[in-house]
Image (tube, helix red, strand yellow):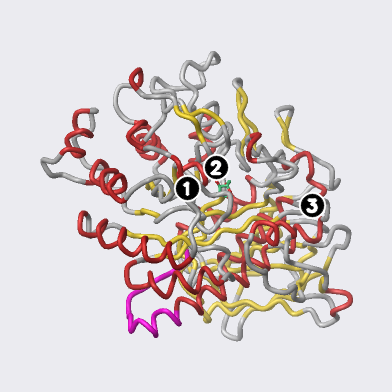
Amino acid sequence: MPPSIHIDPARHVAPVDPRIYSGFTEHMGRCIYGGLYDPGNEHGLADANGYRTDVLQALKDLNIPIVRYPGGNFVSSYRWQDGVGPKELRPRRPELAWLTEESNQFGTDEFIQWCRLLGAEPYICLNMGTGTLEDALAWLEYCNSSANTHYANMRRKNGHPEPYGVKYWALGNEVWGPWQVGQMTAEDYSKTAYQWAKALRLLDPSIKLISCGETGFADWDRVTLKTLAPVVDFHSIHLYTVSEGNHDVNVMGPAAAEKGIEITKSLIELAKIEGKLTKDITVCFDEWNVWDPVRAPGEKGAEEHYDLSDALGEYKAVASWLNVFVRKADIVKIACIAQSVNVISPIITSPTGLFKQTTYYPLQLFATLMQGTALSLHVAADAPEDDTYTGPTVPPFVAHLSVHTPPAARLTKWIDASAVLSPSKTEIRLAVVNRHQTRAFDVPIAFGPDARVAPRLVVHEVWSPQLGDRNGFEGEKVKTVERKVDAWDGVYQCKEHSFQVLVFTLL
Ligand code: AHR
């Protein structure tokens, strides 16, 4: 029996939160400088404020609702005060995350203005490494206060009379990691973050606070949630999947994230029971992507050229990541791809232009089409030896990154899918990844008992015949192709190593 997909449009999982298609910009490599900010660009690609207009357009086409900033590891030794005020007075500082120098020519005001141009909400991560609670309160006051007080007046003096109203604030970044400036134990972090949360809320009760989690399947997550559940709105988790030369491990890697999300959901429930809490706490997966730090080291700017290793299946891996977030729509309310420009990114710039990596296209299809209500869906694969992959799903990098043991591998199907009922409730949209390198599958697709679907569909496909096909400044071989199928017989011919969104019309 070939694998088959079963969808019941009457069985709703949860609304898909558009914030799962969010981004992340860090002071790292060429993300900010030479990426989104390039004043004086000789080819006329930057506007009067130095923002790259081609970058803005490419990101606007991804419908990005929120952008996280300024790190990442960078934030843990960042003095936000250095990045505001007259540019000629801003100090250059040693930068300890990526061992570079920070010019501070781009800071909070430039970031907020860029977000406004993009049409995205800013999300600021606080420095819990070298930063103090006093610095954090000052940053919040600078951004959000309308009072006649020092930092609110500093913002006004810098030319910004109205408060920015930054809603999302994270309590530190990867504080558990040995590479982090100011690493702490889970207990120490929880105690400190609890006090920070209390004080930040006294200054601005309207903000949403995000606790620093690990992978979702670490004891750090259990300990921190137990203490911080009463004072936070989201728990953040991070994970990168990596191939280390193995296509199958790369495309199956997001299964580890799905497991992490399930475990985090239970840890949140447990913390709420123990704390007698009725409030909502959801997952903010604020760093995810395909990243091999050996192939693209952070200290060298982490420029993953996915086109160079397309044989490893990055665009399928990114699509599988996004399938996970849609399937887990009940608990994942924010997810930020790490990152948005040049660094581990779907777009790569040069002084003369940009190109879209293979991973850009699944991201764009999800952000534009996979909105609405997530539907219950089942992929049946009855012949395990044939239709399912039984190797490891836990990327080796997870073990390297995490200070705890990742969950065991589990049986994973070659066909990976998620489905939504469109916002107008007139269409079912089905995202399907065939993670097999060489096998095509004829996949029967069945709809729930009361659903009637027109015998035609629109297919948005990302595929290229040669695994080695690549995108680059010289051209894009891997991109979305749209076609119509007029007489559909209930079976979809799913090409090898392909990704597609199928749009069905409900009758
Ligand atoms: O996104 C690159 C880095 O990966 C971030 O700075 C850090 O938070 C993570 O380890």
Horizontally, residue 245 falls left or right of residue 461, namely: right
Q: Are marks 2 and 1 in contact (CB under 8 Å)?
A: yes
Specify the quadrant that holds the N terminus: bottom right
Q: Earlier in the sequence, mark 2 or mark 3?
A: 3
Q: Position of residue 142 (x, y in %)?
A: 25, 41
- Which residue matches tag 2? 340
Q: Quadrant of residue 217?
A: bottom right
Q: Residues within 10 Å of mark 3 (few under 14, many from 20)?
A: some
Q: What residue lies at 71% left-to-right and 67% top-to-bottom?
A: 416
Question: Which amino acid, by three-letter code, is at mark 2?
Answer: Ser
Q: What residue lies at 39% left-to-right and 85% top-to-bottom?
A: 273
Q: What residue lies at 51% left-to-right and 40% top-to-bottom?
A: 59
Q: CA distance from mark 3 to mark 1?
A: 29 Å
Q: Is residue 457 above or below residue 156?
A: below
Q: Is mark 1 within 8 Å of ligand 1?
A: no
Q: Is 73 in front, or is 345?
A: 73
Q: Looking at the rendered structure, which numbered label has been put on residue 244?
A: 3
Please tell me whether residue 280 belongs to the stretch shown in magenta.
yes
Question: Which amino acid, by three-letter code, is at mark 1?
Answer: Ile
Q: Position of residue 94 (x, y in %)?
A: 49, 30
